[in-house]
Amino acid sequence: MKPRTRFFLALLAVVALGGATLWFTRHTHPLSRSSCVTVPTGSTEPKLAAPKSAIDQLAARPPAPSKVAETQLSNTIAQALPRLSRTVTNWREFKPTKLTVAPYPDTPMQFERVSVREENGRTIWTGRNALNGAFLVTVATEQDWHAVLEVPTADSFELHISGQQLTMIETPNIGGCGSDKLALKDVGPTISSDAATPVGTAQPQAAVGYTYVDVLFFYDSATFTLNNSDATAIANTLMARIDSANVALANSAITNLRWRYVAAYQVPDYTPTTDLGDDLNLISYDFSNPLSSSRTVCQFVYDKCVLHGADQAVLYVTGTRTAGGNTVGEAWSADNGGTTPAIVGIGDARAAIMWKRTSDNAITGYMTLAHEMAHNFGCRHDRATEKATDGDGQYYYGQDLSATVGTIMSYQPSIIPYFSNPNVTYPLSGVDVPTGVAVGDPKAAFNAKVLTDNASAMANLRALVASSSSSSSSSSSSSSSSSSSSSSSSSGSSSSSSSSSSSSSSSSSSSGVSSSGGSSNSGGGGGGALEPWALAALALLGAARCGRIARPRSSR
C-alpha cells in the first residue's frame, strides 16, 4: 500500500470514528478541550499528557486524490501551512496556539499547542492532535524552522523551512535495524578534551523531575553536504527528533526519562565504510575491526563525550552500506545473561544511523533514532523478529499489535510512536489493544519498564567516567594488537559557538545543575567537563588504553 494511501485511510478512520464520538459526547455532556492536553504553567519544560481522543481537535477533511498526484507532497509554505495568514520573518517568534499542517496539499491537520519553550537559542513548540499518538514538534531559529509530524499508522514527515523555502520529506519506517549486536560492559578509554564548542550546544533545562540522558551527535561529511553544509539546520533537525522521541516516551507512560540533545559535531576526515556495523565500531571501543582510522575516530568521539558529559553518542552517515544487510541503524545491546535487562557499558552507549541511504533514497527520522537509542537501554525487537521462545523469562521485547502494526521496537510495516507497555492501549479497528504484555506472561513485552528502570543507570554513565574511569581493571575486554594513538585536537567543522556547554557549571539556581556539573535531580544527566589536572592524568591512561579494548560481539 502506498504511503499516501495509508495516510488517507488513517485520517478517514479517525473522521468516521470521530463523527460517532462527537455525536455521542454532544448528546451526553459538553466537550472539554482542557481535558485533551496539559499546558504547563511556570515551567519551560513540557509535561506532555498521554494523548486522548477529543475529536473536536481534529481538523482534517477527506482527501481529494484527483487534485494532486499520488506522490506529490506539499512543496510551498502556503501549501504546508495553509492557515498561515502572514509572512514569518522570524521563526523563533512563531508560537501559535493552534497550527494547521498539510503534508499533502489536501490533507490539513490541526495541532493544539501543549508546550513551548526557549532553549539553545531556539524556540521548541509541541502540539497534539486528537488522533491517538499524533503530534507535531517544531524547532526554530530566526531563519530556520524544522518540524516533525507524526501520523500513527501512516508515515512520519519532516518539514524544513529556510528563509521562505520549504522542503518536505516522508520518513517512513523502513526497518533494517542490525541492532542485535551484543556488548559486555566496559568503561572504555578516557581521553583529554579540547575547549571547542559546536553549534547548538545545549543549555541546562529547568528541573521538573525527569532523569535526563544526554545525547551527543556526530555526522560525516556526506551528511553535512546533504544538508547544504548547514550545521545549524542539522542541529535543528536533531533537536526536533530528540523532542519527538520524548513525545513517544510520554505516549508510553514513561514518566521519569527524557533524552536531551547536547551538541552535534562533524567527524573530521571520516572514511566511509561499506557496512554500518563498521561505522558503529569506529565510534565504539571495539578495535578488533582493522579499519585504519578507528583509533582517531574513537578518540574524537570519546573526547567530545567527556567534554560535554554525554551519556549516549549517535553517528549519522549518508551513502550506501551494502554489506551487513544494508541496514539503516545499528546499536549495542547488553548481553548480561540474566532476566533483568541491563544497559550497555559506557564504551558501548552508541548507535550508528543512516541519515540517507542513497541506494533507495530512504531518509530516516525520529523513529529510527528512538529505536536505536532504546537498544542501549536493553530493549529488543518484537518476539517474532528475535525468534524468542515463549516463557523465556524476558520482557525486553517490542510488541506486534496486529499482523501489520507494532510498537517502536517492532519490525512491522506500520509503527506507532509507543514503546511496548501492557498498561497503555492503542485503538485498532475500534478495539483498544494493549501495546505490551505484562511481566510474567509467557509472551511478556514491556519496553517501557526497561526504559523506566534503566533511566538512572544510563544517565549516570558519564558520572562513572569522572569517578572510576581511571581504573583500568573495570573493563572485562581483552586486548588487541592495536597500538595507542594521540588525542585528536580537531573540533570538526560544525564547531564554534558562543553558547556555553551543557557540561559546564551553571549559575542559575533554577536549572537544577550543581557546581560540579551534575544535575541535582536528573540522575546525573549533563555530567561535566573534568578539571585540567584530571584530564591530564586521565589522558595518560587514555593514550595507553585507546585502541586496546575489544569485546565479544555478535551480528546477524
Image (spheres, rainbow, N blue to C red):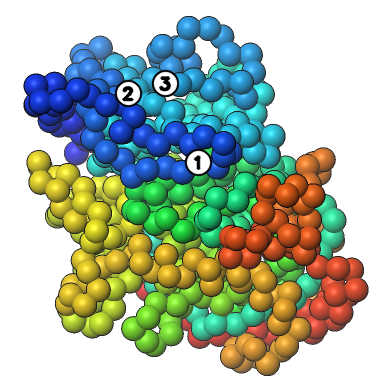
Q: Which of 283 and 215 is in front in this view?
A: 215
Instruction: Give the structural element (helix, strand or loop) at label 3.
Output: strand
The quarter of the picture where the C terminus appears is bottom left
Find residue 161 and report its image quarter: top right
**Residue 391, position as x, y percentages in the image:** 18, 81
**Is 244 drawn above or below residue 212 in the view shown?**
above
Cβ–Cβ under 8 Å for marks 1 and 2: no
Provide the residue designation for mark 2.
109
Q: Residue at x 10, y 46 (%)?
A: 431
What amino acid is at disc 3? Lys
Relative side of 395 to 545, left or right: left
Q: What amino acid type should be assigned to the residue bearing mark 1? A: Pro
Q: Residue, x 63% and y 65% (percent of image)? A: 524
N-terminal label among 1 and 2: 1
Within-10-Å neighbours for mark 3: few <14, some 14–19, many 20+: some
Q: Mark 1 or 3, which is nearer the eye?
A: 1
Residue 131 drawn at (x, y percent): 26, 34
Can residue 313 be seen at all in this image of the molecule? no
Of residues 107 and 441, which is closer to you in this image?
441
Rendered-image quadrant of the N terminus: top left
Identity of the amino acid at label 2?
Met
* Among the 4 quarters of the image, the one containing residue 114: top left
Residue 46 disc label: 1
Residue 69 drawn above or below residue 48: above
Residue 98 is tagged as: 3
Distance between mark 2 and mark 3 Cα atoms: 10 Å
What label does residue 422 carry, if any?
none
Name which residue lies at 33% across and 44% down.
50
- Tell me where residue 459 appears, x and y as whole percent: 57, 66
Q: Is mark 2 on a helix, strand or loop?
A: strand
